[in-house]
Every structure is written in structure tokens, then in C-alpha cells.
Amino acid sequence: MANTDDDSPIDFSPMIGRIPIRHLRPQQPENRWPASAYDGEVIPFEATIFREGHDLIGAEVELQRPGGATATHRMHLEGAGTDLWLAHALVDEVGDWRWRVRAFTDEWATWLHTAQIKVPAAIDIELVFQTGAELLNRAGLLDAAKTVATKRLSPATRLAAAEGASVDARSLVTTSEWLTLRVERERSGVGSWYEFFPRSEGAKQQKDGTWVSGTFRTAAKRLPAVAAMGFDVLYLPPIHPIGTSFRKGPNNTLTAAAGDPGSPWAIGAAEGGHDAIHPDLGDIKDFTYFLATAAKNNIEVAIDLALQASPDHPWVTEHPEWFSKRADGSIAYAENPPKKYQDIFPVNFDNDPEGIRAEVLRIVRYWIGVGVTIFRVDNPHTKPLQFWEWLLGVIHDEHPEVVFLAEAFTRPAMMQSLGQAGFQQSYTYFTWRNTKLELETYLHEVSRETSGWFRPNFFVNTPDILTEYLQFGGQPAYKVRAAIAATGSPSWGVYAGYELMENVARPGSEENIDNEKYEYKQRDWAKAEKAGLSLAPYLTKLNLIRAAHPALRQLRNLDVHWSDDEAILVYSKYLPGAYTNGSDDAILVVANVDPHSVRETMVHLDESRFGVTPGETFTVTDLITGAVFDWGTDNYVRLDAFHEPVHILHVSPARQR
């Protein structure tokens, strides 16, 4: 190092506090946007905190409500040697909360730890007690201080007096930066979704083979049955006029016959575009009647926001610059090789971005004005992330009650970024996670690793997705997928026909044959239920269980446990009574994910993760069958996929600690 005669102080501003506070959660990577939560969610606030040497430290979270009131929650060390400090807190008000972590050297805990080592060993006894008495005096605990300082008393008596005292003695207090947690309404994170095509509900086939479309009025008759199954969100595919140019026929054929309705996602015709209603469904009065009927049945309606156009959409003639041109001058239709969508033109968001933004905002505002509060967004990953950040930001400022669900089956970076930029929910990879290991890994990911910005909606099927697991797993597969979806995520959904176990795929594809996207589908729900061929009672039971158990309406409380069998998945969801104004709520799920077998195995539990003292016996009740068992750390399980492939077990509150 070169010599210098300059005695001026070195200009240095540390990037870390006296006690390092790092890796705060929940927050987003880069902290570019605020982390998110929903009203009624219990949030684990975490930080990595440590200091040099052997002095003990303490920590707390300061949580500030949107109105400014603050509360402090003491943090605890999560496991020896981890330096991970944790506190749980309920967020129960919509708005932007702020939070920060405060760390400090805990002088009393440090002294007490030292005293409990040195006093029994007769090391520096009087010096130790002198220091303790000073701390007690400073805390105003004069009687305890006097006992600790009295030399004529036995060391054991003096130490016992100290151990019975509660002292808050802090030094080197260090505070982190403030972070924002955006809390949205409960529906942004919790819901049981059902999807149907309104044109199929009430559709009738004539003697000549042609069809008369269902309407909003006939579809409204289906709403009480949807509500009776416990679903509280109804998602409708696009309700707009459908183009006739290059209209798809049954099973995605390139030629449509007269009377074929076409894909609802080929939006736009002479009757209008995204702000119009398909005349076969009715008019705006019929739609508002449908919304009102849904509300009477405690159902919210979600409509599809699909930013694309059929060749007949008014945009094509009014704004041809919004679309991409091919080398021959024609407009490029949508493709996802090998899939081709000849009936759809994608919008090029780099052509007149200001004009496109203004039009989409107008459309969204229009439907909000009609009474829509939820939008399921089709293929958001094919539009710029910057566009979604802008649109969702504007709508949040104007209408914070509005929820956007991203239908984004795509690469992780885009999928996660859509949630980070403002989407309240997303479709997930759950559909293709079927083995025990796949499910364990994915359930942990969505409940722990990405829960600060990515809210999963576990749809079990869609008009586009009929997995091999469902195609060949029979009724057990349908039960397993529904049970895990309904208990593994606070939001889950089914597409109509799931309860009828429609499992025949179009050859060479992963979607149903005679797909409802391209034709009307008439289902006899009552006949299937009367014949015992419907899963509606099972879906109803799942939703009743969700309604009765608040632990299942939380996202971040899932813990994976262990079984000796490669096909037996085990996890728990737990909510302490402090957050329910009552008893603890603990649910154990044990699922046989092999729909073709009978499995016998041992299940091994960490009872501390669901409120039971390890080693104690506790009682569980199967909420599916009503069976009652006495369980402990290690338990024998037999699950017959052809009978009941899943246990959903409620831990009796009386046996919880």
C-alpha cells in the first residue's frame, strides 16, 4: 500500500447495517414491483439475521397498515444454525402495507446464556451476577436485581431469580429498509372456479341436425347447479361475435359447415368486436340478467380477455396497422407450431402501441362498467410484459377490486414475470405434474418459493387440456386430481364435463374429441347423476371441505411429509387458532397418485408442522368417508385407487397442543 500524508477521514458508506439483515421475504426478485398477498392471508415474514461473535440477537417485524397504524411481531429463529428469522402475521385489510425488520443484540438473553454456563461451573460468579443485577436495575426490576446481587444467597437461588425475570435489553439496534406488501381482495387468491360455454347450456339439436344455440337466459338456469356444487367463480369463454372467414369446423377441421358455431376465440364479425355480444347469446340486457342471477347464487362471473381478432373483426379494416404483414402483403394468422389458428390474427403490439393501449383500456373499462370484476386473460405471454404492467397498473389504480387470471402455459421466466407485473392469478404446470415427486416439488414451489408474487389456480382440465393421466386413469384419476387441486391451492377450477369424466381424446392431441371449442355440446347432467355416473357429489364434498376449513384457503402453509411408497403423496395445511378466532385448523392429505393400484405403506409425519406435540397420539377424521383413526408420527395407510384414492384428514382440535 502506498504511503500517504493525507489524514482526512475516509469517505465510506456501508451497504449493510451494524447487524446484517438480509434476504427479506416476501419481496420480489429485484424488488421492482411490490410483493402481493390477499385479504385474510397469513404471511411468513422472513429475514436472514446474524452478527459476529457469540452474543445472542433478537428481531421483530414492524408492520404498517394502509392507514398508517403499526404493530410489532416478535420473530423467532427457524432452526438452529440457519440464521433464518421468522414471524407470521395476518393481513386483513386491502391496500398497500409496509413492513421492515428490526434486529438487535439481546443483552439479557446473552447474559442469561452466559450465566447458565458459568454459575454452575463456578466461573466468575460475582462478576456475572454484578452484570445481571445492572441489567435488571436498568429494566426497573429492583427486587430481582436485589436478589441477584445478594452474595449471602446461594448461586442457585440468585440464578433462579434471574431466570424468572423478563427483560428487554437491546443494543446495536439495526433496522432494514421499508418494503411494500400489496394486499388485494380475498378473491384474488381464493376461489373455486367452474367453466362452461353459455352457448351449450340450453342448446338444442333440431330434427335436421342443425343446432339452436343456448343463450344467457338458458345458461342462467345452470347457475344454481354450479352454486350447489360449491363453485363461486364462473368463467365464460369469449362471449363476442365469431368470425366466419376460415372458421374452424368440428375437431378443428379447416372447413366449417353451415351452422357450425366456430371457435369463440376467433373474435369479431360484422356484429362487432370485443365490446359486443354474440347475437346468438342475447344482448347486453341478457348478459346483465345473467350477471345478476349469478350474484344471487353467490357466484362471480369471469369473462375472457383475448386480445386477437378474426379476419372479420372491425379492427382489421379500421386499424390494419395493428397486425403483422407477411412477405406477400397478407396478414399473418396465429401459429404455435405445429398448431395453426387460421381463423385468428394476432395483434402486433409494436405497431401503434399507444392506439392499441387506448383501445384495450376502453374495452376493459367498458366491461367493468357492465359489472365484470374478473378477467381470464388468454395467452398473455404472447403480448409484451410492458403492456401488461401498464394496463394492470392503470386498472388497479381505478378499480383495485378487479382480478386478472393469466392463462399462460409458458416458460417459467415469462410465467413468473406476469405475476410479478400485476396478474393476481395464473394457470400453472399442475396439470402436468402427476407423480409423487413432481407434485411434492411443485407444491413446495408454489406455496413457499414463489408465493410472494405468483398465485396458482389449479385447473384440473381445460377445453385444450386432457392429459394422458385423465385419458387412461378412469374415475380414480379424476378424483385424485380434483382432491389435490382443491386442497393444494386456495384457487382451483374445473371445466364442464369433468364431473362426467369425459376422457376420450382427439387422436394425436391432448384435448377432448368433439371439442366444445368448435361445436355445441349437450349434456344430460341429471341423468348422469341419477345413474351414479357423475362426480358432482365428489366435487361438492371437496368444496364443502374447503368452505369449512380455513387452512385450505391459505397458500403459504403447505408442508410436504414422507411416505415409504413412491406413489403415496403426503402433505399438511395448518392454520393456528390465533388466526381463526377459534381452534387450530389442521388438514392432512394422503393421496395415492397411481390410479391403477392398491397401495399399502407407512406415512411419516412431522407433527410440529401442524400443531401437535411430536410423539403424541392424535385423532384424525377422514372428511371423505367419515372414518376416524388414532395417528402418531408413523402410520400405516392403505389406499385403494378403485375405492377412495385420497384421505383428506382433519386433525381433532382437542388433541392439538
Image (cartoon, rainbow, N blue to C red):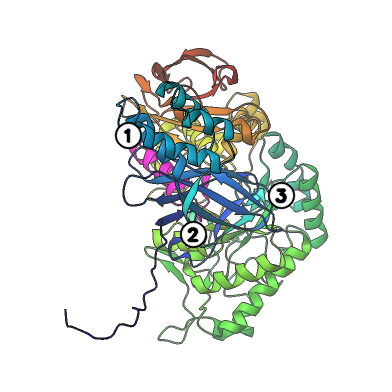
Q: Amino acid at mark 3?
A: Glu
Mark 2 neighbour density, 10 Å: few (under 14) some (14–19) many (20 or more):
some
Can you tell which of label 2 and label 1 is closer to the viewer? 1
Q: State whether residue 178 is above or below residue 221.
A: below
Determine which residue is flagged by label 1: 124
Where residue 247 appears, as percent x and y from the top left, is: 55, 65
Provide the secondary structure element on which disc 1 rests.
loop
Q: State whether residue 590 is above or below residue 453.
A: above
Give the spatial CA distance, label 3 vs label 2.
Answer: 40 Å
Q: Quadrant of the N terminus?
A: bottom left
Task: Between residue 309 and residue 257, name the one nearer to us.
Answer: 309
- Ranked by sequence position, the earlier of labels 3 and 2 is 2
In the image as oriented, which residue stretches furthest toward the front? 152
Residue range in magenta is: 432-459
Determine which residue is flagged by label 2: 176
Task: Between residue 52 and residue 180, name the one nearer to us.
Answer: 52
Where residue 31 appears, as percent x and y from the top left, is: 48, 64
Determine which residue is flagged by label 3: 300
- Ranked by sequence position, the earlier of labels 2 and 1 is 1
Residue 263 shows in the view: no
Mark 3 neighbour density, 10 Å: few (under 14) some (14–19) many (20 or more):
many
Provide the secondary structure element on which disc 3 rests.
strand
